Image (cartoon, rainbow, N blue to C red):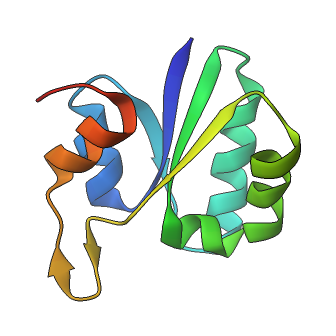
Amino acid sequence: MQYFVIGDEETVLGFSLVGVFGMQATNAEQAQRSWDKALEDPENGIIIITENVADMIRPVVDRYLFSESFPLVVEIPQAHSDGKQKDLRALVNQAIGVSL
């Protein structure tokens, strides 16, 4: 089982530093393409997606959150939200349990 992250450039880069593959999404089309790519590989057991990207494709994400048991979908806040810098290291630790 492996992780797949979908989010802004900084989030995807941060997760890549701990070996998690992912795709950047800045609009709904890219978000949907990234989501579809994540689902292509049956080894992707956990999809980590930033809240702002999840909002771009909310009906699709909610369908998995509320009706599918696999893969597990974890929404995390974006590193920069509400004008405040969030600690990317803490987000990674919280989402996947890897201590950097």
Q: Where in the figure is residue 91, as x and y percent of width and height?
A: 27, 49
| Picture quarter with the N terminus | top right
User: At x 31% / y 53%, what residue is drawn?
Assistant: 11
Q: Where in the figure is residue 71, as x and y percent of width and height?
A: 71, 29
| Figure quadrant of residue 56 | bottom right
User: At x 21% / y 31%, what residue is drawn?
Assistant: 17
Q: Is residue 55 above or below residue 3?
A: below
Task: Depth check: give the residue in front, 29 or 77.
Answer: 77
| Figure quadrant of residue 46 | top right
User: At x 63% / y 22%, what residue is drawn?
Assistant: 45
Q: Is residue 84 left or right of residue 7?
A: left
Q: Is residue 51 above or below residue 43?
A: below
| Figure quadrant of residue 27 | bottom right
Q: Where in the figure is residue 8, as x and y percent of width and height?
A: 39, 62
Q: Is residue 71 above or below residue 61?
A: above
Q: Is residue 17 left or right of residue 12?
A: left
Q: Is residue 97 left or right of residue 23?
A: left
